[in-house]
């Protein structure tokens, strides 16, 4: 079980990259934009349901990995970046421009941790704290991208 949890939490050991593992985790998560766009095309409710299930699973996996690694929010855990990137792109137009802008904005917000992301990161224990701060940063990214689309900065 330990090996499976570490494999999933690190997104197939991407989290073990010694420098900028979160950035690489977000990069590896980019194809999920296409997966969730396909789910949305089938059923928006299905896309939301799968997203909620993914976030719940990520919280459990990150919590178990925290316990196995004996380090809270270890840089080796990058499944939270995947959940955050999906939040950043959920229900947005599927274009390379949007995918790249989401990646860049999400990385900045994941580092800055605007409220309540920073609060969650510091005060919510276990896997929920590891994952939900990234989901909040992802939703902020999503709102920024929607504003950029609205004013025509993104096509």
Image: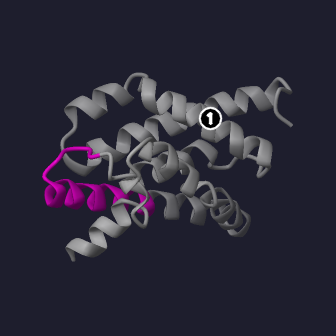
Q: Could you tell me residue 114's position as x and y percent? A: 43, 22
Placement of the N terminus among the 4 image quadrants? bottom left
The x and y percentages for residue 60 are 27, 60
Residue 28 against residue 97 in the figure, above or below: below
Q: Name the residue under label 1.
A: 104
Camera-nearest residue between 127 and 7:
7
Which residue reaches farthest front?
18
**Main SS, magenta residues:** helix
> Residue at 32% across / 52% down in the picture?
76
Q: Dot 1 lies on which element?
A: helix
Q: Which residue is drawn at 77% across and 52% down?
A: 94
Q: Sort mark 1 into few (<14), some (14-19) or many (20+) by Cα contacts within 10 Å.
A: some
* Residue 139 sits inside the magenta stretch: no
Query: Is residue 12 positioned above or below 27 on the image?
Result: below
Q: Nearer the viewer, residue 23 or 60?
A: 23
Tell me which residue sits at (56%, 51%) in the image.
86
Magenta residues span 53-74
Residue 36 sits in quarter:
bottom right
Residue 141 vs residue 13: left or right?
Answer: right
Camera-nearest residue between 132 and 76: 76
């Amino acid at each position: 079980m330990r090996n499976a949890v570490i494999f999933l939490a690190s997104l197939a050991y991407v989290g073990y990259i010694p420098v900028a593992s979160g950035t690489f985790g977000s990069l590896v998560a980019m194809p999920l934009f296409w997966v969730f766009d396909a789910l949305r095309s089938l059923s928006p409710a299905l896309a939301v349901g799968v997203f909620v299930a993914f976030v719940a699973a990520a919280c459990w996996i990150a919590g178990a990995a925290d316990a196995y690694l004996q380090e809270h929010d270890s840089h080796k855990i990058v499944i939270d970046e995947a959940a955050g990137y999906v939040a950043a792109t959920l229900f947005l137009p599927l274009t390379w421009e949007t995918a790249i802008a989401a990646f860049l904005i999400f990385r900045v917000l994941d580092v800055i941790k605007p409220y309540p992301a920073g609060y969650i990161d510091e005060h919510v224990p276990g896997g929920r704290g590891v994952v939900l701060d990234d989901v909040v940063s992802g939703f902020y990214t999503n709102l920024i991208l929607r504003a950029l689309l609205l004013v025509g900065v993104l096509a």
